[in-house]
Image (tube, rainbow, N blue to C red):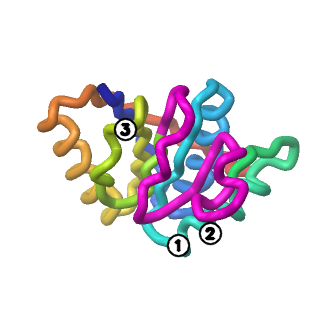
Amino acid sequence: MTQVDFYILPDTTLDARLEFACRLAETIVNKGYRLHLHAEDEAMARVLDERLWDFRPDAYLPHALLDSEQADSVPATIGWGEPPAPGEPGTQAMLNLHPGIPEWFSRFERVAEIINQHQEVLTAKRDCWQTYKKRGYPVKAHQLPGQGNHG
């Protein structure tokens, strides 16, 4: 059964949410997961693509947009709308940055949701939390401390 983790940020900005998404994506891939980042729309997917190139000057997370030729050869894909094609056997994870829950989320072993203190995100993700719980999925919250330095 899919394990769902909610990461709760003290920040209110989309920028902080995307910055954390990049760091979390790196952590997930470094643990050996194939990762799919599910964006709200194409614009967010392209911003994520850019951010993953340069969020850390000393590291690079191999990634590609889902509809690109490189999508099958990298550990992280970014998409919106359509689900990724089922990949080769292996541990699969999804980082959901969409306000809702995609119908196909249960194909992943792990799902990560990021909440920041922006009212629209709080409202949408509160609904997601309740939906996962009602359906019987194991849900865990991770309250993150204030970063202070966004370097």
Q: Which residue is mark 1?
A: 42
Which of discs 3 and 1 lies nearer the camera? The answer is: 3
Q: Is residue 13 visible?
A: no
Q: Earlier in the sequence, mark 3 or mark 1?
A: 1
For label 2, count other residues whose C-alpha is less than 10 Å away and answer few (under 14), some (14-19) or many (20+). Answer: some
For label 3, count other residues whose C-alpha is less than 10 Å away and answer few (under 14), some (14-19) or many (20+). Answer: some
- 33 vs 12, left or right, is right
Asked which quadrant contains residue 138, the reply is top left
Q: Quadrant of the N terminus?
A: top left
Relative to the observer, which residue lies in front, 98 or 81?
81
The reply to whether the C-beta atoms of the residues labelled 2 and 1 are less than 8 Å apart is yes
Q: Residue at x 41, y 65 (%)?
A: 81
Q: Return the x and y of residue 91 as percentages of the image width and height.
A: 52, 27
Q: Residue at x 60, y 51 (%)?
A: 77
Q: Circle 3 — which element?
A: helix
Q: Earlier in the sequence, mark 2 or mark 3?
A: 2
Which of discs 2 and 3 lies nearer the camera? The answer is: 3
Per the rendering, the mark at residue 107 is 3
Q: Which residues are magenta?
A: 64-93
For marks 2 and 3, give the CA distance.
24 Å
Per the rendering, the mark at residue 46 is 2
The reply to whether the C-beta atoms of the residues labelled 3 and 1 are less than 8 Å apart is no
Measured along the vertical axis of the image, is residue 60 above or below residue 32?
below
For marks 2 and 1, give the CA distance.
6 Å
Look at label 2 and name its amino acid.
Answer: Arg
Q: Circle 1 — which element?
A: helix
